[in-house]
Structure formats: C-alpha cells, structure tokens
Image (cartoon, rainbow, N blue to C red):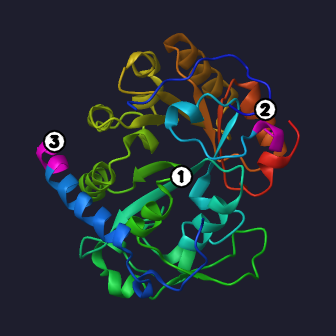
Amino acid sequence: MGLGHNRGMAGPTAAHPVAAWQGPPATRPLSEATLSRRSLIAGGMALAAASFGGCALNRPDRPAHTFGELVGEDPFYVAHRGGGANWPEMTAYAYDQAAALPFVQALEVSVCLSSDGVLVCSHDPNTLRVSGVPHEISQTPWATLSQLTVTAAETEDPDQPRRPFSRFDEVVEAHIDRLVMFVEPKVAPAVEPLMATMVGLGQPERVVWKQPVNQKNFALAKQHGFGTWGYVLDEPSHVNRLGQFAADPSLDMLGVAVTASDALSAAVRDAAGGGGKPVMMWPVRTRSQRSRALSYGARGLMTSDIRTLPTLPL
C-alpha cells in the first residue's frame, strides 16, 4: 500500500534493473531467460488454442507485485501506451523509461498482429498516424515494420528522437517480473496469440486483460488467472447493459473515458458501485482531468503523462 489516503473501496484480488536502450528489437541479443520464456510461451500457445476452441506520496517506493496489490492503491496509475505524452508511444524506449520511474506500478500495451504472426505494440491497425508511413499491420511482415519509427509529435517534447516500432513479446518479457501489465488485442486475430503469450509467461497475477466491456474473452482470461477490465463506450450495446456488466463475475473493473459525458460517467460509477467493482478512467493527462475522474469515484487512472501527473498533489 502507498502512504497516501485510501478512499475505502475494497479492490478485487487476482488468482494469485531496467536495461538501457540497445537498438531496434531485431538487434537485441536474446538472454537465456528470454529463450526460456519463449519456450514457455510456446506451451501457452497450445493451452490457449485449446481454450479457444495521486501524488508521489500516494505511490509506493516499489512496484506492485500483483493486480490485487495494485487495486489496493487509491488512486493507482497505469502508464497509458507507456506514457504516450512523454515519449514516442508504445515503443520499447517508452516502456523502459516509464518502468524506470520508482513510483510506476503498471504499464498498458495494445497489440496488433503482423502478416507473419508477430504481435506488434500498436494502438492503430495502420502505422500512418505514428510513423507517417501507411502500412496495414495485418498485411505487413515484421521485417518491414521493424524498420519504421514512431514520431514524438504527440508528446510534450516533439523534438525528441523517433523510436523504432517494438515487438510485444520483448516489451512484456522486459517488465512482467516487476510490473502489472494491462494488455489489449486491438484486432480479432491478435486475441488468441496474445492470450497464449500471457499464459506462457506464467505470471497471471501480473496480467490484466482489457477490452471493450461487451467483448467475450473475459471469462477465458479469468480462467487463466488474469485480472480483467472492461471499458464502457457510449454505445447502446454497452450503456443498456451496465447492470449486467457490473454483475458479471468475469469482470473485475469497469472503465469509462475521462471525456465521457456527465450522464455516462455517473451511470458507470453507479453501476460499478452496485456491483462492488472499482472504476478506472482514461486517458487522464491533466490535473483537471484527474480531479474529474476522482469526482466520479475512479480508483484507477490510466495516464499518458506517467512522468509528471502522479507526482502532482491531489
């Protein structure tokens, strides 16, 4: 637990030195631990395939060991896209920088799948927004994607160097021993290999599976011992079933965008409270957005400004 105040909602319990930048992922040597992990991941593939059929004082001085410990913090922070307001989003460099901060406990990663089956850290299925080069990730091999770089144009320091696209397996293997990982498949073909990768790592207590709240993979994620977070969008298929989602035992947390309407924010807060579930809001970048999130009872704050926002007084 951190040293700050706790606002009192009990969180769910889950089923149980940062390296310097070394160049693009393709050039990094694989350690014995990485090779061993990849053999575990291969085993996880078979298992998953069968299944498919605050301020600084609010933060602990060490990373949370489990999802259950993380949600015991009030508030707790997650580095959205590795801190996309601070560094080029979803790059190994961004995740390494965020993980090096002593108060960071959790990272968020979205993934797409390349044409040759590599899980790629990317929110968008097309590379245009972040690289300036239009490639559909699903139609492009990793050898091509690995040559692209991510712009810093959307960060607080747009003149900082661009950074290479990153493989998901290398990012998660670098940090799963220390930090809670929020992972989301952004395209349907990525669901099974992502689930298998996380199963193969053998640390379910540090995995949170996130998707829109009406998706069907949460029960399977819970079977594997992962935490789960379903986020609510302003769509009838979400809004009209809030009570059902709040009562769903396969969902540990509900979420809503910090930019959502007052009506939707209140509805999610009330539904989650009725179901005994914490609320997480995203993407919380400013102090005013944090204040708004906390006013709606959010316990979790997914922030792109992971370097600064958690250090500012509440």
Q: Which residue is mark 3?
A: 51
Give the mark nearest the N terminus, 2 or 3.
Answer: 2
Pair 1/3: label in front: 1
**SS for callout 1:** loop
Type of amino acid under label 1: Arg
Per the image, the residue denoted by label 2 is 3
- The image shows residue 27 at horizontal and vertical percentages of 43, 88
Q: Position of residue 75 (x, y in %)?
A: 70, 33
Query: Residue 145: within the magenta?
Result: no
Instruction: Give the residue drawn at x 46%, y 57%.
Output: 110
Callout 1 crowding tier (Cα within 10 Å): few <14, some 14–19, many ≥20: some
**What secondary structure is marked by label 2?**
loop
Judge whether 167 appears above or below 161 on screen. above
Instruction: Determine crowd level at label 2: few under 14, some 14-19, many 20+ residues with C-alpha closer than 10 A.
Output: few
Using the image as rendered, state which of residue 146 and residue 311 is in the foreground: 311
Can residue 233 be seen at all in this image of the molecule?
A: no
Q: Secondary structure at mark 3?
A: helix
- Residue 295's spot in the image, x, y percent? 76, 26
Verify CB contact (< 8 Å) between mark 2 and mark 1: no
- Quadrant (top left, top right, bottom left, bottom right) of the C terminus: top right
What type is the residue that disc 3 sits on?
Answer: Ser
User: Image height check: is 143 above or below 202?
Assistant: below
Magenta segment's dominant SS is helix
Magenta range: 47-58
Residue annotated with mark 1? 178
Q: Quadrant of the N terminus?
A: top right
Residue ranking furthest to the top: 274
Report how far apart the C-alphas of labels 1 and 3 lie in the structure: 27 Å
Please name the residue shown 44% across and 83% down the image.
28
